[in-house]
Structures are given as structure tokens and as C-alpha cells.
Amino acid sequence: MNDRLTFLTAVFTAMLLSSCGGVKHAEMLMLQNVQNQVGPIDSLPVLRIQSDDILGVFVSSQVQEANASFQEGKEAESASSGEQALGVKDGYRVDEAGNIYIPYIGAVHAEGKTVLDLREEISTKIKDYYPDATVQVRFLNFRITIMGEVLRPNVYTIPNERLNILEALGMAGDFTPYAKRNNVLIIRERNKVREINRINTQDPTLFQSPYFYLRPNDVVYVEPLKAKQYATQGDFFQRYSGIFFPVVSLITFIAGLSIK
């Protein structure tokens, strides 16, 4: 009887310890088996303006009147860096018809164009009023949402027009130890169509994926491994192990005395 009780106690303790399973080393690696190579970058995204995009149009000129007319563009720039909600006055919103409305020029069709195309068109038209004007155009709503098993989940404003998934994960502090690196979810809305796709950050062909470079308003979700559930259970057992083991020892001791 005593031997049986001791055996059951040992088995139960072993099961308890095994429940605190960890993450395998291979599951924590990224870009496995990548070979040294040099080659052209042929998958750079061409970002085209869509309806509901918010654009910053910055015009500078020696004529103070021109600078004052486009002052709202500067306000939009400062607002975008502070994670504030962009209103109508913060930049130029592309309407359902694909147009923005510029002082002096009026409606300019923006949808389907790149920011370089739009800059050239605005530059040409604004020179009728301010020959020395220089124009810059950029996205103000290039934001990426990163959720799930990363150290700093958040909504990030991107200052330029090119960001890949590795850079985005770096901004978010990288994966947690319990991240499912081979099944990262990308949610993208483009031309009123929602795309849902998964990428494997451990696959060396990641660089060729059409989702390697992110686009404005993409959502990145990193799922947890099953090991996180076991780790949570392990935390529970570890928290109460100071009570559990003395109780088991006491029961074993009492049982031993009763048998004698």
C-alpha cells in the first residue's frame, strides 16, 4: 500500500512538471535555411491612391500667400505623428469620386495614381499661380496595426511608403516566445476588397511573397502557439506549488504512519 501511494505520488508529480512544456528551439527561428545571395529586388509594391486615402500636399513658395493657403497640410503632418484621428481638415481626403480639392486648382483626380504622378500634376497646375512653387505629396494614413504575440502590439504610423513585414515586426519589438512564426495573418483591404492571407516568416521564399511588403491599413495578427496554453497552466501550478508539495508530503507521511 505504501509503495503504491508513493508510486502514484511520483506519477502525479511527473505529470505536473511535464505540463509546463516549453517552446521548441526550431519554433523560435525565422528565415530558416536562407542561403547567401545577391539579386535584384523585383517585388517592390506600387502604391496607388484609393478613395478614403488621406494625402498630405505640401507647397512651398516665396509667396507667403501660397504658403498660408496650404498650411493645413502642415497641420496634418503633425497630427499624423501623434496617433490622432484624422479629420477633414487634416490633409486632403480622397472622395468617392476619387478626387481631392486643392486651393486655387479645385478638383484633382487622385484615385489610381501614385503620389509621384499626383505631385507632377499638381506642380504643373499650381505654376499657373505660383511659378516658383515646389510640391510634395505623401500618404498621411499609412498605418499598420500589429496584434497578437508581439512585444508591443499597437497601431504604427509609417513615415515613408515602403515597409516590409520584418521591419514591421521589428517596430513591434519582435515576436514573443509563444508566437506562431510560420502562420502570420495579413488582412488587407484594397479597392473595396478584403484580402486575408497567411505568411510563413520561417520560409526563405518569404521575400518573394506579395505580402512581404505591407500596404496602408494592413492588419498583422500573430497567433499564439499551443505551448502558451501549457505555459499558462504551468504558471498556475508554479504559483501554488508551494502549497501543493507540502500537502502531498504530509499526506504521504500520514499514510505511512497509518500503515505501520
Image (cartoon, rainbow, N blue to C red):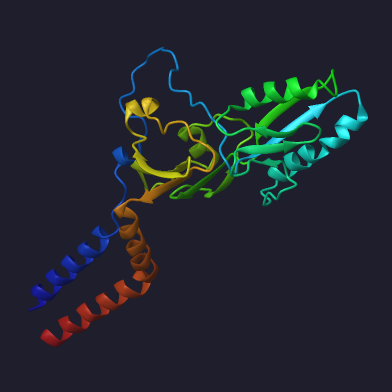
19 or 118, which lies in front?
A: 118
In which quarter of the view is residue 130 placed? Answer: top right
**Which residue occupies the extreme bottom position in the image?**
258
On the rendered image, what quadrant is the C terminus found in? bottom left
> Could you tell whether 186 is left or right of 227 in the image?
right
- Does the image show residue 260? no
Residue 248 position within the rendered picture, expressed as x and y whole percent measured from the top left: 25, 76
Q: Say which quadrant the N terminus sits in.
A: bottom left
Above or below, 41 relative to 15 = above
The image shows residue 152, relative to residue 241, as above or below, that is: above
**Horizontal and vertical percent for residue 165?**
46, 35
Numbered circles on residues, count:
0
The image quarter in which residue 112 lies: top right
Instruction: Decide if residue 257 is in sight here.
Output: yes
Q: In which quarter of the image is residue 43?
A: top left
- Left/right placement of residue 20 relative to residue 59 reads left
Q: Give residue 125's position: percent from left, percent from top.
A: 75, 23
Q: Where 222 falls versus 11 (above or below)?
A: above
Residue at image coords 68%, 38%: 100
Question: Residue 78, how many percent across, how many down?
Answer: 75, 42
Above or below for 62 versus 214: above
Nearer to me, 62 or 120 = 120
- Residue at the spot x=45%, y=42% of the render? 188
